[in-house]
Amino acid sequence: MAAGLARTRVREQLRAWGLEELVATTEVLASELVANVVRHARGPTRLRLIRGRSLICEVSDAGAAAPRIRRATELDEGGRGLQLVSALSQRWGTRYTDEGKCVWTEQPIAWAGTPR
């Protein structure tokens, strides 16, 4: 699954759920996680959004290596994706499955009557 397709799917689903305020951030999160699979892991890749008290964005792949935050220098062209994921999500992590791993992010959902 390419990052562009992931962004499209995220946008469509969040609009269907009435969560337009989360579209931009979730598009970036999904795009970064999918791009990491393309660069560092192997497929098949699966994107899943879970709506509950918070919004969970999961990207699964067949790789076994856990992602880790790199400290990119000013001259590095890459290596900032997980820093971005960490900054944009409330929490994120990795869990292992029988097929590989799943990297997930969590974002709060502001409900009517809930302070933002």
Image (cartoon, rainbow, N blue to C red):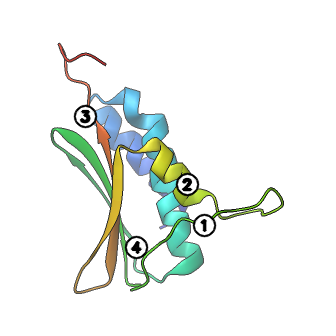
Q: Nearer the viewer, mark 1 or mark 3?
A: 1
User: Which residue in the structure is indicated by mark 4?
Assistant: 45
Label 4: few (<14), some (14–19) or many (≥20) C-alpha neighbours in 10 Å: some
Mark 3–mark 2 CB contact (< 8 Å): no
Nearest to N terminus: mark 1 or mark 3:
3
Q: For the residue marked with disc 2, what is the amino acid? A: Gln
Label 1: few (<14), some (14–19) or many (≥20) C-alpha neighbours in 10 Å: few
Q: Answer left or right for 63 relative to 80.
A: left
The residue positioned farthest toward the top in the image shown = 113
Image position, residue 1 (x, y; %): 47, 67
What residue do we see at 25% from left, 16% from top? 115
Distance from Cα at disc 3 to Cα at disc 2: 28 Å
User: Which residue in the structure is indicated by mark 2?
Assistant: 83
Q: Nearer the viewer, mark 4 or mark 1?
A: 1
Distance from Cα at disc 1 to Cα at disc 2: 8 Å
Nearest to N terminus: mark 4 or mark 1:
4
User: Which residue in the structure is indicated by mark 1?
Assistant: 70
Mark 1–mark 2 CB contact (< 8 Å): yes
Mark 2–mark 4 CB contact (< 8 Å): no
